[in-house]
Image (cartoon, rainbow, N blue to C red):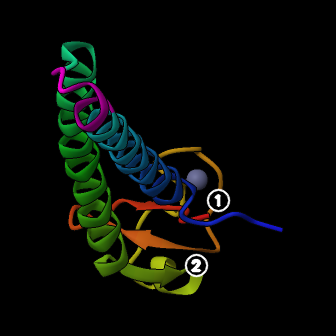
Amino acid sequence: MEFENKDTFFKVLALLTSVITLWLEGAILYLVISRTKFLPFFVIGGILNSVFEIITNIKLLYVAIVKLKRLDNLLEVTREEIDEEELDHTCVICQHDIEFGKMLECKHVFHLK
Ligand SMILES: [Zn+2]
């Protein structure tokens, strides 16, 4: 079984992990303040770190989604179409022949899978 969009999956997982971490740190902060009336600075540092981590993970996820969208919008080509245009049917990435791939604006083609 092939696992597509692995990169996006792990970025979503990282985002969820940082949100859960922030939620747990918030719960610890609430418990410590409500029971001891003491402001635990060691938890506040962790909360700030989690907030920055969430912002970073959202940025990374957004960039990955935009790149996937750009990849989806590229023209799909078959070997016959490449030959009709008299272009090189060698993948620019792996250097193997292409039967089905994507074409860049510069007319280079590459395997999608
Ligand atoms: Zn290739």
Q: Are marks 1 and 2 in contact (CB under 8 Å)?
A: yes
Q: Which label sits on residue 97?
A: 1
Residue displayed at 29% across by 45% down: 57
Instruction: Please tell me whether residue 96 is drawn above or below residue 40 in the rendered image.
Output: below
Between 87 and 9, the one lying in front of the other is: 9
Q: Determine if the magenta segment contains residue 42.
A: no
Q: Amino acid at mark 1?
A: Asp
Q: Which label sits on residue 79?
A: 2
- Residue 77 in the image: state x and y as whole percent: 47, 81
Residue interval drawn in magenta: 32-39
Circle 1 SS class: loop
Residue displayed at 32% across by 42% down: 22
Q: Determine if the magenta segment contains residue 34.
A: yes
Badge 2 crowding class, 10 Å Cα cut-off, few under 14, some 14 to 19, many 20 or more, is some
Drawn side of residue 100 relative to residue 82, left or right: right
Residue displayed at 31% across by 32% down: 35
- Residue 94 in the image: state x and y as whole percent: 59, 44
Badge 1 crowding class, 10 Å Cα cut-off, few under 14, some 14 to 19, many 20 or more, is some
Q: Which label sits on residue 78?
A: none
Between 47 and 28, the one lying in front of the other is: 28
Estimate the spatial distance between the alpha carbons at disc 1 and disc 2, rounded to whole Å.
9 Å
Query: Mostly what secondary structure, the magenta segment?
Result: helix
